[in-house]
Image (cartoon, grey):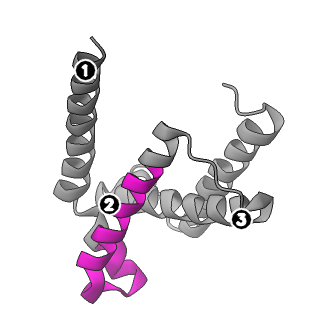
Amino acid sequence: MNILLAIIGLASGFAVASGVFALVTILGIIPRLCDRLGLATDTHLMETIITVGGTVGSIITIFRISMPFGICFLAVIGLFAGIYIGSLAMALAETLKVVPILCQRTNLKLGIAVIITAIALGKGFGTFYQLFLMGGQG
């Protein structure tokens, strides 16, 4: 029975991961992110690093591997993970033209940088509230 559950879990994981990577690939998020960061020549390296990071993160989560590096290391890793997720979300929004469509429909000419900064700060403060003030619940 456990072997059957392992096979189903592995197949489900492959299906979800394939769907996520297909979405990221079809929308061209990684090449756009590399272009914005000035790393257009290193797109393949960036894709490889993202894939390896996701795999290592999944392994650490599934097998509950503890790493005795302390709070400072955890804060640095959390900062980099947050920067990556934020960059990926903004690249997705840019790919889907969310901000330009919002500005066009609301006739907004000035303040686009303020809106993007407010989105980033809102996400950051919301995450801080959820993780530190609610104890990760919710």
**Is residue 106 shown to the viewer in this render?**
no
Which contiguous range is marked in magenta? 32-57
Q: Amino acid at mark 3?
A: Phe
Q: Is residue 110 above or below residue 64?
A: below
Q: Residue furthest right?
A: 133
Q: Residue beneath label 1, please? A: 3
- Residue highlighted by disc 3: 73
Q: Quadrant of residue 72?
A: bottom right
Q: Which three-letter amino acid code belongs to the residue tagged 1?
A: Ile
| Label drawn at residue 51 | 2
Q: Residue visible at 23% across and 22% down?
A: 8
User: Depth-wise, is mark 3 or mark 1 nearer the camera?
Assistant: 1
Chain-order first, disc 1 or disc 2: 1
**Does the magenta portion include 35?**
yes
Q: Is residue 24 left or right of residue 94?
A: left
Callout 2 environment at 10 Å: few (<14), some (14 to 19), or many (20+)? few
Helix, strand or loop status at disc 2: helix
Q: CA distance from mark 2 to mark 3?
A: 22 Å
Give the secondary structure at mark 3.
Answer: helix
Dot 2 or dot 3: first in sequence order is 2
Identified at 26% across, 54% down, the residue is: 24
Q: Is residue 20 above or below residue 96?
A: above
State how far apart marks 3 and 1 are (Cα). 36 Å
Q: Residue at x 50, y 47 (%)?
A: 60
First-in-chain label (3 vs 1): 1
Report x, y in % for residue 126.
69, 43
In the picture, which quadrant includes the N terminus? Answer: top left
Residue 76 image point, x, y percent: 68, 66
